[in-house]
Image (cartoon, rainbow, N blue to C red):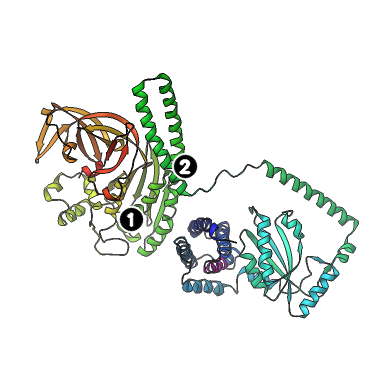
């Protein structure tokens, strides 16, 4: 079978199973006696092992099997959950993740895991003689009466094989309740068994197994030279198998069909008839349920297809704008009505396509609990992570970019924010600190807040460090608000750490956070109270591809200003313009706002005539504002944001371009670059 076609599915499902292992291990750490959590971890590991073995990644399958043995010991009461055991299992999951990512990157999935395998084996052998599976095999190693009934010729074949040194085993297999393709799992079991021996008989018979005319259990008798442990391990490697038990069969322990017949009393026959009728009724009911059950509501779609669909729709939006322009020119009622209907339909289509691209922030948040646990352990702190609003959805493009900034913020909160248990107790706080990660929708934006109850930001220390590093002057420092002082920690190369560590202190990280968030069209604000904690608030747009803008004229050129950056528009008189620090400013609603003339910024050829009044657009970046001077306002419009390409990627204050309805190109202004 060609396995490459299943590789993408294998990688995705492996990541899902490893994420499930991480989440459940964190839950197990809090509730070490909850066996249902152990069963969930075991199920995820077992599925991963089966998939890896099927795809031929033996190293991955073998490590998962070793981890599974320890989990099996826990769920069977042989091992107790301890922090030491959990650390080793976490380490095994880390290695498994590294192997899966290696495969995803085109590697072979091989990795030196000898250390973690040795630790797993020590755990396995230190508290128990073996895994539960081996104990089960050992317990049934004595000759027991066979479960299957054998014809005379079958008994002869088995007896002769045993005399020649073969072993005969009856292998009972139980499939998981949620197994969908029972016949496929049976086929895989038979294929594995027939590689190492000869199948003599099965119950139910093979034809019934192929037609899935059985519940969850089936038994197979096999002649082989392999050991019981080896055969059990191979069968267990198949996905969606719940339980495997093996009984050795020896000469004299057979149940013949004649014995079965003579043992049958009228009562027993009557009982079997009732059982058969009940089974038939169950099968009929199951068939009816199967017919009534709705089909799956979800399908996996390659993200490239969604990107192509989005690109085609963006072209449709451009043509829609063109049609609206033509409709205005001709002023034909029928044409206007058709264009209005097309606008409504394309608007609905736009909502559907954007929703298809939406991904819950949970996909990013899920990796943080494990990271926080490890950081807390490294720093000898007690930290609890609380997550709210993980179901909040963002565009996939934003999701891909927001992960690293959040990692930097969480590491910063844990290293600089949360104090050690001793310091917290001394200040009358609980010994364990809390880091809250919260996401929620508001209008066309998503807000992500990271809050900690740590020491807060020392305003004086930050300001002094900024002056020492030349980030601000002593005169500028006197005019800064508290929030502006806090935001100095986002400056490049800024750090208040007394010593360097692997976690923070090198002055890199938070400046990357700000630049990444601003490149996404978002903003970050910081609030803090000394002794109580800090809150970082990130504002992000829902989508990056289709944005709402205000179109403006600057001489003969058209520009687009994103509505998310605009506070308001206004018209001011020329005599209202003031001068301060060699710059033109205005007093707008009691606040001094600098004026930026776009014709000067973008060097637009001037026609020489000076206007008596200015049209201005007030824009913001965090708490800072500026007034952009334009010639006139055209109006609001939804436009498609197009990149300028590799040759024009360093154009100052321009984030992209769009094609308008009349075919003209309008440049989209990056307000963040204009405000310092």
State the predominant SS element of the stretch in magenta: helix
Q: Which residue does the numbered mark 2 point to in the structure image? A: 356
Q: Nearer the viewer, residue 247 or 5?
A: 5
Q: Position of residue 207 (x, y in %)?
A: 76, 57
Q: Could you tell me which residue is drawn at 50 percent across and 48 percent down? A: 301
Q: Nearer the viewer, residue 301 or 433?
A: 301
Q: Horizontal placement of 141 versus 416: left or right?
A: right
Q: Position of residue 615 (x, y in %)?
A: 20, 29
Which label sits in the foreground, 2 or 1? 2
Q: Earlier in the sequence, mark 2 or mark 1?
A: 2
| Disc ID at residue 665 | none
Q: What is the magenta range? A: 57-70
Q: Could you tell me which residue is drawn at 40 percent across and 22 percent down? A: 336
Q: Position of residue 416 (x, y in %)?
A: 29, 57
The C terminus - image quarter: top left
Q: Which residue does the numbered mark 1 point to in the structure image? A: 408
Q: Horizontal placement of 180 versus 458: left or right?
A: right
Vertical position of residue 424 compared to residue 62: above or below: above
Q: Position of residue 263 (x, y in %)?
A: 88, 63
The answer to whether residue 63 is magenta is yes
Q: Quick check: can you spot residue 393?
A: yes
């Amino acid at each position: 079978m060609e396995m490459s076609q299943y590789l993408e599915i294998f990688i995705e499902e492996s990541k899902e199973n490893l994420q499930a292992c991480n989440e459940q291990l964190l839950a197990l750490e809090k509730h070490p006696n909850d066996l249902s959590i152990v069963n969930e971890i075991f199920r995820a590991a077992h599925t991963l092992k089966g998939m890896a073995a099927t795809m031929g990644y033996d190293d991955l399958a073998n490590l998962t099997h070793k981890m599974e043995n320890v989990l099996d010991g826990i769920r069977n009461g042989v091992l107790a959950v301890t922090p030491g055991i959990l650390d080793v299992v976490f380490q095994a999951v880390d290695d498994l993740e590294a192997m899966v990512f290696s495969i995803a990157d085109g590697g072979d999935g091989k990795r030196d895991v000898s250390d973690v395998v040795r630790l797993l084996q020590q755990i396995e052998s230190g508290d128990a003689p073996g895994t539960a599976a081996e104990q089960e095999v050992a317990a049934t190693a004595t000759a027991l009466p066979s479960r299957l009934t054998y014809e005379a010729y079958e008994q002869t074949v088995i007896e002769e094989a045993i005399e020649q040194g073969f072993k005969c085993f009856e292998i009972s297999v139980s499939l998981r309740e949620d197994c969908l393709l029972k016949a496929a799992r049976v086929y895989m079991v038979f294929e594995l068994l027939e590689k190492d021996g000869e199948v003599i008989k099965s119950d139910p018979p093979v034809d019934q197994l192929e037609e899935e005319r059985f519940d969850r259990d089936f038994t197979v008798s096999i002649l082989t030279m392999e050991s019981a442990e080896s055969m059990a391990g191979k069968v267990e490697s198949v996905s969606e198998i719940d339980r495997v038990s093996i009984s050795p069969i020896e000469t004299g322990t057979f149940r013949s069909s004649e014995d079965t017949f003579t043992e049958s009393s009228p009562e027993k026959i009557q009982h079997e008839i009732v059982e058969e009728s009940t089974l038939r009724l169950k099968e009929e009911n199951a068939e009816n349920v199967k017919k009534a059950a709705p089909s799956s509501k979800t399908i996996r779609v390659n993200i490239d297809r969604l990107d192509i669909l989005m690109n085609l729709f963006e072209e449709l939006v451009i043509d829609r704008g063109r049609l609206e322009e033509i409709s205005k020119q001709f002023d034909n009622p029928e044409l206007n009505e058709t264009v209005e209907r097309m606008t409504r339909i394309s608007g609905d289509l736009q909502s559907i396509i954007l929703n298809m691209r939406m991904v819950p922030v949970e996909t990013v948040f899920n990796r943080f609990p494990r990271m926080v646990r490890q950081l807390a352990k490294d720093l000898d702190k007690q930290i609890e992570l609380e997550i709210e609003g993980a179901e909040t959805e963002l565009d996939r493009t934003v999701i891909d970019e927001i992960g690293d900034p959040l990692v930097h913020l969480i590491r910063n909160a844990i290293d600089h924010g949360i104090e050690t248990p001793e310091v917290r107790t001394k200040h009358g706080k609980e010994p364990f600190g809390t880091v809250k990660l919260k996401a929620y929708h508001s209008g066309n934006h998503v807000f992500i807040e990271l809050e900690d109850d740590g020491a807060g930001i020392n305003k004086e220390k930050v300001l002094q460090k900024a002056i020492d590093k030349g980030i601000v002057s002593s005169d500028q420092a006197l005019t800064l608000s508290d929030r502006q002082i806090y935001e100095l920690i986002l400056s490049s190369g800024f750090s208040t750490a007394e010593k360097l560590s692997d976690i923070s202190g090198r002055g890199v990280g938070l400046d990357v956070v700000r630049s990444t968030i601003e490149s996404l069209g978002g903003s970050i604000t910081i609030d803090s109270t000394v002794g109580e904690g800090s809150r970082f608030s990130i504002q992000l747009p829902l989508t990056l591809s289709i944005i709402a803008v205000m179109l403006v004229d600057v001489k003969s050129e058209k520009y687009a200003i994103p509505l998310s950056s605009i506070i308001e528009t206004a018209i001011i008189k020329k005599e209202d313009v003031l001068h301060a620090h060699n710059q033109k400013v205005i007093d707008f609603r009691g606040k001094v706002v600098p004026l930026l003339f776009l014709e000067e910024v973008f060097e637009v050829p001037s026609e020489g005539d000076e206007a008596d009044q200015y049209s201005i657009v007030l824009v913001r970046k965090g708490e800072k504002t500026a007034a952009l001077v334009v010639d006139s306002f055209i109006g609001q419009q939804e436009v498609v944001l197009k990149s300028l390409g590799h040759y024009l990627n360093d154009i100052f204050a321009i984030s992209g371009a769009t094609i308008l309805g009349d075919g003209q190109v309008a440049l989209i202004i990056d307000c963040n670059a204009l405000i310092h």
